[in-house]
Image: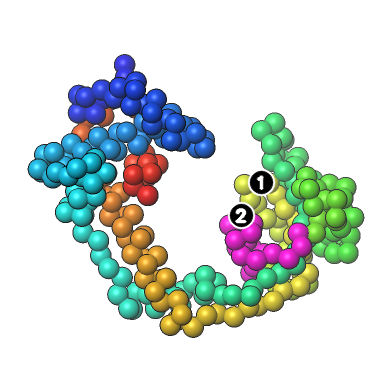
Amino acid sequence: MGVKVNGIELTDAEIEQEISYHQDTENPLEMALNTLVVRRLLLDEANRLGVHAETDEQVIDALLAKEVSLPQPDEDTCRRHYEQHPEHFTVGECLEAEHILFQVTPDVDLQSLRQRAQDVLDEVLRDPTQLPVLAKQFSNCSSAAVGGSLGQLSRGQTVAEFERVVFAMPEGQVLPRLVETRHGLHVVRVLRRAEGKVLPYEKVCDSIRDALRSANQDIAWRQFLQRLAGQARIEGLEHFVAADSPLMQ
């Protein structure tokens, strides 16, 4: 059975064309089906409400403008965001770090890997100068060739879970626990850091307002689509995730 939305089946031609737009995604077929279902839900609702335009894209834009209320961030909200997230508005912040990566792979024994990583961390804590030597011996990162050195890092250059930890560390210290990321387990030492400077609110208030407005838009659109999906009859699609569609991004 094919995929149907409110009794109307998606055609092979539609699916084939849509797949071509998602070849750089992890699952092109799933993304294509989600996108087509989203489009069908929105166009059906527009037809029900008598919303018309020259193209399907214009119809969808008109429907969202008509039916979805977008709360605008006020000054207090923008200032609160600025005060709660100073790291987002800091320039010149950087650090030098070195690490040892114990990579997690599908067939690895996690318990043994964690014990090996902990043993190496304990050794580094006893003598931090040994980290480069141990990195060359144990690290699964390409930085092993240079003793685990990651060079100078700025925000945005590493995965978020690693960045959160290292940018909160004091200079010259080894983190006394393993850092867990999507890549594996890390032993980390921060050598030097430059704190940077927080930009004044007046210089970033417009970008904050735009970002919060965009976030509000995403939430409102997804809630609208979830309501439509809850009222619709979607058949033949095991995993329908509205947020996965580029139409709602």
- Verify CB contact (< 8 Å) between mark 1 and mark 2: yes
Q: Give the range drawn in magenta.
A: 150-168
Asked where in the image residue 215 lies, by quadrant, the reply is bottom left
**Mark number for residue 183?**
1
Q: Would residue 214 appear left or right of 155 to someone viewing this image?
A: left
**Mark number for residue 119?**
none
Which residue does the image show at 19% across and 42% down from the upper left?
A: 54
Asked where in the image residue 130 lies, by quadrant, the reply is bottom right
Which residue does the image show at 85% across and 58% down from the upper left?
A: 131
> Residue 74 placed where, x, y %?
30, 75
The residue indicated by pointer 2 is 159
State whether residue 123 appears in this view. Answer: no
Quick one: label 2, few (<14), some, or many (20+) residues within 10 Å? few
> Residue 2 placed where, x, y %?
32, 19
Amino acid found under the numbered disc labelled 2: Val
Residue lying at the far top of the rendered structure: 1
Q: Between marks 1 and 2, how big is the CA–CA gap?
A: 9 Å
Reading the chain from its start, which is encountered first: label 1 or label 2? 2
- Secondary structure of residue under mark 1: loop
Q: Would residue 93 appear left or right of 176 to someone viewing this image?
A: left
- Picture layout, residue 199 above or below residue 235: below
Quick one: label 1, few (<14), some, or many (20+) residues within 10 Å? some
